[in-house]
Each structure stands twice: as structure tokens, then as C-alpha cells.
Image: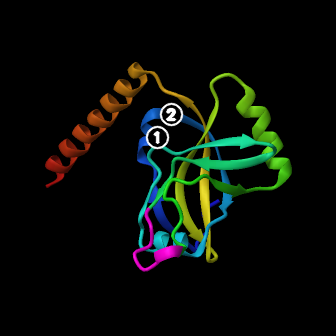
Amino acid sequence: MARENTRQITDNRKARHDYFVHETYEAGLALFGTEVKSLRAGKVNLKDGFVRIHQGELWLYNVHISPYEQGNRFNQDPLRNRKLLMHKSEIHRLFGKVQQKGYTLIPLSLYWSRGKVKVKLGLCTGKKNYDKRRDLAEKSAKRDMDRALAARHA
């Protein structure tokens, strides 16, 4: 999905820690001009964001885009709900999958693609605490092995 002419705005690292990502999708994001300028400055937080399907449309909730400093009266509410743009057939397919038990849509990253802001959505299920502990243990073991190899070759 990410092409060679893309540039990352932000990444939701907490999502990969809290959820198993089964599939990813790309959606456009409907924004106002001052929000786009804030995104160019990198003033966005995806940490608590989630996506819901309401009346056949995708809506992004709890994503904080800071007000643009020179935006004065044109600034929008930083936590307003934002519409996501996808083909209707994709939305219907996602709606069927989200209806299954435990699935939710989480924004994984924001990036520029051909001058437009895109959202990478993940179809996710929640991790239990023991899954999170196992992931941390694997990451720590890999880091220790890499250090040992580096020390051996140095």
C-alpha cells in the first residue's frame, strides 16, 4: 500500500502493542485546511484513535490534531470526528468483518501519498496481558542476542 512517493506523518506504536493486526486497509481523510497545515508540522496524536462505521460511512474518533498556530478563527476542534474516504464496497466488506466478535478498526499510521493524507487502518483484535508479556520477552531476547553477536564480532 505504501508507495515510493509517500512520507510518514505519524505512527501509532501503541496499537501494535495492544492489538493483533490481521489486515490493513488504506483510506483517505477529509480535513480542513488548518488541519492539513498542522499535519505538515507533525502535530497529531493517534494513540487513542478508533474507527466506527455509522450509516454506511467510516468515521475516525479520538485523533487529536493540534490547532494550527496561525489559524485563528478557522481552526477546528482538535478532537472532532473526521470522515474517512473509502469505496462503498470496501466499507461493506469491513462492516461484515467488524460485526464478528472481537474485531475493531484502529488507525495504524498517517502518511502523505501523492499530496493527499492517507490513514492506514488495521482490522484488529485485542491482546491479553499474557500476549503483551510474551511479545516483550521475545523483543528483549532478540535484543540480547543482537548485542551478543555485536560484541562477538567487534
How far apart marks 2 and 1 lie (CA) works out to: 5 Å
Location of the C terminus (image quadrant): bottom left
**Amino acid at the residue labelled 2:** Tyr
The residue singled out by tag 2 in the image is 19
Residue visible at 48% across and 26% down in the picture: 127
Q: Which residues are magenta?
A: 66-73
The residue singled out by tag 1 in the image is 16
Q: Is residue 7 magenta?
A: no
Using the image, determine if residue 105 lies above or below residue 58: above
Residue 118: assigned label: none
**Amino acid at the residue labelled 1:** Arg
On the image, the x and y values in percent for residue 121 come to 61, 48
94, 84: nearer the viewer: 84
User: Does 17 sit left or right of 1 as displayed?
Assistant: left
On the image, the x and y values in percent for residue 133 come to 34, 25
What SS does tag 1 mark?
helix
